[in-house]
Amino acid sequence: METSEEAKAAAAADYPSIGDWETCAADPSYRAAVIDLLGALAYGELSAFERLAEDAKMAPTLEDKAALAGMAAAEFHHYELLHARLRQIGADPTESMQPFAEPLESFHRMTAPADWPESLVKAYVGDSIAADFYREVAVRLDDDTRELVLGVMADTGHAEFAVAKVRSAIEAQPKIAGRLALWGRRLMGEALSQAQRVVAERDALSNLLIGGVEVRGFDLVEVGKMFNRITEAHTRRMAALGLAS
Amino acid sequence: METSEEAKAAAAADYPSIGDWETCAADPSYRAAVIDLLGALAYGELSAFERLAEDAKMAPTLEDKAALAGMAAAEFHHYELLHARLRQIGADPTESMQPFAEPLESFHRMTAPADWPESLVKAYVGDSIAADFYREVAVRLDDDTRELVLGVMADTGHAEFAVAKVRSAIEAQPKIAGRLALWGRRLMGEALSQAQRVVAERDALSNLLIGGVEVRGFDLVEVGKMFNRITEAHTRRMAALGLAS
């Protein structure tokens, strides 16, 4: 896995700086977009904490339970970092998170794992999609926000334990592979559908993503490409897990 | 609240050192007792994580949810410290925790909060009783184990937010005070009953507590006194919350 420093260097090499937070936030629509983004990420981390803690109950052993609980605790720490940043830039964290509560709760409601292997796949897929999204969005941000986002991203990867567990579950019971492959598709489908809902409803955030803020001459085609890259990475990961997606 | 350093100094002043882990663990029954103790504490922290994360669902606001989730994350960190120590001294963490799973799960099953005020009271009471127990037991331990136990204890107090919340809930709805007072008694009662079950069933741990290891000339009367001190502290805290216990 990349270290935080490597990820930052890679991001910096690909995309030149657009300036620091102070400079960029002088534009009210940029400021609103970043507050939206941080609110969405913060609620995402808090709800991930909640659901992982819930799913940990299905763990067959104490070690498994502790592994998922450890992921949950890491997500809570991310939440704290994002929450602190919202406060620091003068935003109300609760207000900033509220618009994203319903889409994220819908996602989790539609993707409640039925058993332990589904929990593992969800933990792994969720963690990976989140890392992809953090990496994609980081390049569109001012230096200070980018540093925060890459810092949080660098602390993902707590789901790596799930890979070996899922593989051995499939070896032990080859017939579950079909169901888990379907499950992986459903997770990605629900994630995209909620993401599209957010893009449609949140003007400021969408503007950041489609370039309305004129940050990078970014357009709707680019957003589509971003979702495609994330989907492709998901497909590769599912294949590596032994699951056709 | 006392700092970790103050707590250690106070403990050291009251009770002279019985030696370091290396020296004390040469006695197999001392070693077994400490493994029992760390196993019980580790499972206690892991189950506290699970239950707090579960109870956080009842939170009426995002801020409240995050406060309880933050306690859960802190408990998970304590679990990690205790787990790492078990490994370090050559014990199997899962095996060491297993005997305490049933009493702790029973405790939580018997004390599932019915609503948010009950969750708050349980978080506060649980955190406080745990801190009292850590402090009591620390003085009976070798220097290294004592340092670990006091270090974990010094990171409790995350439930302080609950005090103001419970007080204002009672002010808003004075009639819930009776039910919450009863709830506080039930929490303490169940905790004592499970603790007594553990003392009855775990020879090594009981020996440490009642002095069979000849550490301090400690006896059964002293264990009773310890439980009494914890109960008295609980009673004072309930009164401070505006709840007769």
Image (cartoon, coloured by chain):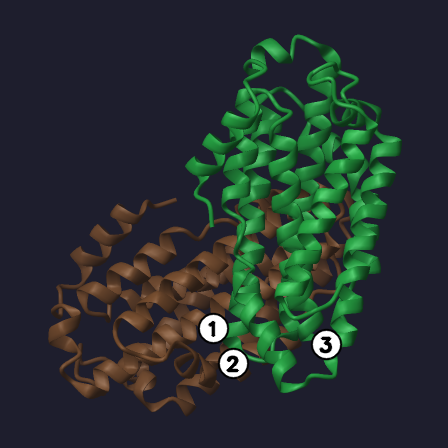
Chain colours: A green, B brown
Left-right relation of A73 to B132: right
Indicate which disc, 1 or 2, sits on the residue closer to the N terminus.
1
Q: CA distance from mark 1 to mark 2?
A: 7 Å
Residue B18 x %, y %: 13, 70
- Secondary structure beneath dot 3 equals helix
Q: Which residue is mark 3?
A: A177
Q: Dot 2: few (<14), some (14–19), or many (≥20) neighbours within 10 Å?
A: some
* Disc 3: host chain: A
Residue A32 x %, y %: 73, 20
What is the quadrant of the C terminus of chain B in the image? bottom right
The answer to whether mark 1 and mark 2 are in CB contact below 8 A is yes
* Disc 1: host chain: B
- Secondary structure beneath dot 1 equals helix
Which labelled disc corresponds to residue B43? 1
Identify the amino acid type marked 3.
Ala
Left-right relation of A153 to A174: left
| Viewer-closest of A61 and A30 | A30
Residue at (67, 85) in percent of width and height = A173
Residue A164 in view in this figure: yes
Q: Quadrant of residue A69?
A: bottom right
